[in-house]
Image (spheres, rainbow, N blue to C red):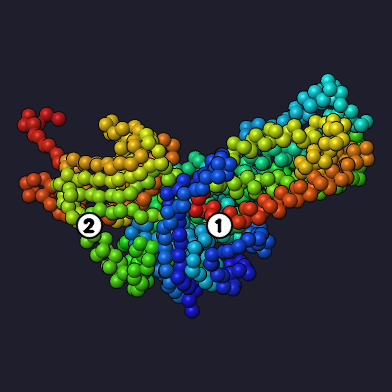
Amino acid sequence: MAVISVRQLGKEYRLGTQVHDTLRDQITALFRGRKKQPAEKFWALRDVSFDVEQGDCVGIIGRNGAGKSTLLKILSQITEPTEGEIRIRGRIASLLEVGTGFHPELTGRENTFLNGAILGMTRAEITRKFDEIAAFAEMDTFLDTPVKHYSSGMTTRLAFAVAAHLDPEILIIDEVLAVGDAAFQKKCIGRMTEVARAGRTVLFVSHNMSAVTAFCSRGLYLERGQLKAVGPMREISETYLADAFSSKGQFEFRRGKVRGSGRIWFTSLNIGPGTANASLVCGDEMTFRFTYKAVTEGIPARFLINIHDQQQVRLLVIDSHTDDSFPYLCPSTGSITVKIPSDVSLVPGRYSIELMALTSDEVADHIPGALDFEVHDGDFFGNGRRAHQPAAFLTKSAWSLDVSGEP
Amino acid sequence: MSADPAALGERVIRPQRGMISVNFAELWRYRELFGFLAWRDILLRYKQTYLGVTWVVLQPVLTMLVFTVLFGRFAKFPSHGAPYEILTFAGLLPWQFFANTLAESSNSMVASARIISRVYFPRLIIPASVVCSGFVEAGISFIVLLILMLIFGVAVRIQLLLLPVFLLMTFFVTFAAGAWFSALNVKYRDVRYIVPFITRLGMYVTPVGFVWTDVVPERWWMWFCLNPLVAVIDGFRWCILGPQFTPYWPGFALSLGVGLVLLVTGLVYFRNTEKTFADIV
């Protein structure tokens, strides 16, 4: 019996209008009798239908802007669909982010109760599981210390421990396995697998393809707001990867809702030394080219390009703020090229790019997994040799021997 | 697993059309979360102030002294045989409840943006729980009031038992305004500048430091009673100080009615904009 059945689901967003109007503008518009420009409409999801059976563990994959987050948000009732219908049997809990509602001023114990309640646990449930949660978070001495004194690792562990002890019939997870150190991640995946084995239904969105394939039996592949393929996870992930790495190394962003204030938003990203594929060769100069738009001229913009490996470990942060020649104020539309000299290179493998735009005090746009790319083996050192052991990076180096041998 | 009635049946998610009313059954299901959020708001309120309880006591007592000197001694407003201090304090108790929680309640939806865009629950809980944190302050103020009554020799009357009813009215008036402003604030970000202005202006048209029937010309009475806090404050004075403060009933009814209209429209407006909160907050 299907525990979730989705029929002709669609969600429409408006684009181009400023999200937060002011009451002042509204009132002046009323007096002047001026009509608002009709907003540009955009379907983040359209005509999506599928069923999820009891006990299924479903991985939802797709590029950025494919509608994955929108789908999860509709399923968790955070936002309303524009058309279509969903029928759900059973209690749903969604983990779109761990630590939702954590407050730095409250103690670990207080936050555990509060966060548990926000995620849908009853007081009795939390009390019963409290010791188990504390043990899972590997925490006993700091439970009565305000969370603001915790290290970020501790906060994450506690937040995840609470989430891992949710016990709903249907669990929705978005990206949250990408937290903590590798050992803790493993523990979390173990716990999730237990949940799935206990006959619970799990829906899982992640850019971490190895986690999705390891964890899920069925896959949903979304593309541009539509369902492209449904089937066994392994097949679906192969289709997806084939598409992702054969596509051209440019990506036009197509999104309903910007994650951030929306004062700046990315419109496209393009990598490589001008190659046709989203691939680079070790030893080549790496180039990123992106375009953006902003709500006003002369906006104080700061851009970040973060590079993650397949395990979602952040390897590299490329920050416009660190380059003196980058202007403080940017025009309302622009194209930016970032060059990384070839003295350092990523080792061959698959990576993903996270883009972030900041205005002086807040995140304006944020695209995790903006583009996946591959680095191919190449003659990095220019002499045909290789480093003895692979690591995350390769760097050129100058060695010299002083024959006098004095220490 | 809790015996959640909604968990047993089938739930249907589809676009809602037309007017959306308040889903009381759902609010009842989420009562525990409501409790937790109210508890959080109370904890935060007192953890973040160094003076904590001292401040809660000091603030109304100092205001009381200023008003007593200003209105009672200098302007010589009649006190109808009651100590002017108590007369003022009786007005301050509901006023402080309103003024101290309204700003936070109005800002509550925007402040909870992260939770709103990640977890579902009836959003009305958010502004309501903030207003609830005012009850702690009201409780402390009530103890201060009892002490003041002892000092000034005001007898405790049986009508004092009605005080919780009027306190609940204060809650609903504040919550009504909170529901309106918090929903408006999600869409129109300049609303947060309007709220402090309203509280400041409200201080003058709310009879906190005086008995309004002495001050306001009679032909303006009904206009004055359009303020929903007038009924609440009259009720407080009547409970605490006795029959010489019996409310002017037609005005009381009007004020109460305005409060009720504010509450119903606030709830309807909130509910009908609620579905877009996660998209625009």
Mark 1: secondary structure: helix
Q: Is residue A229 above or below residue A300?
A: below
Q: Residue at x 34, y 36 (%)?
A: A330
Q: Give the total number of marks visible in the rendering.
A: 2
Mark 2: secondary structure: loop
Identify the residue under disc 2: A248
Residue B269 in the image, given as x and y percentages of width and height: 63, 53
Residue A323 in the image, given as x and y percentages of width and height: 28, 34
Residue A370 in the image, given as x and y percentages of width and height: 32, 52
A376 relative to A382 in the view: left or right: right
Q: Is residue B149 above or below residue A365?
A: above
Give the Cα distance between marks 1 and 2: 38 Å
Residue B205 in the image, given as x and y percentages of width and height: 76, 34
Q: Residue at x 58, y 67 (%)?
A: B1
Q: Residue at x 62, y 37 (%)?
A: B194
C-beta proximity under 8 Å, tags 1 and 2 = no
Q: In terms of image quadrants, where is residue A261?
A: top left
Q: Is residue A56 among the parts visible in the rendering?
A: no
Q: In the rendering, which numbered label is found on residue B275?
A: 1
Identify the residue at the far top of this view.
B74
Do marks 1 and 2 both belong to one polypeptide chain?
A: no
User: Foreground residue, B265 or A101?
Assistant: B265
How crowded pointer 2 is (Cα within 10 Å; few <14, some 14-19, many 20+) is rated as some
Q: Is residue B37 above or below residue A324?
A: below
- Amino acid under label 1? Lys
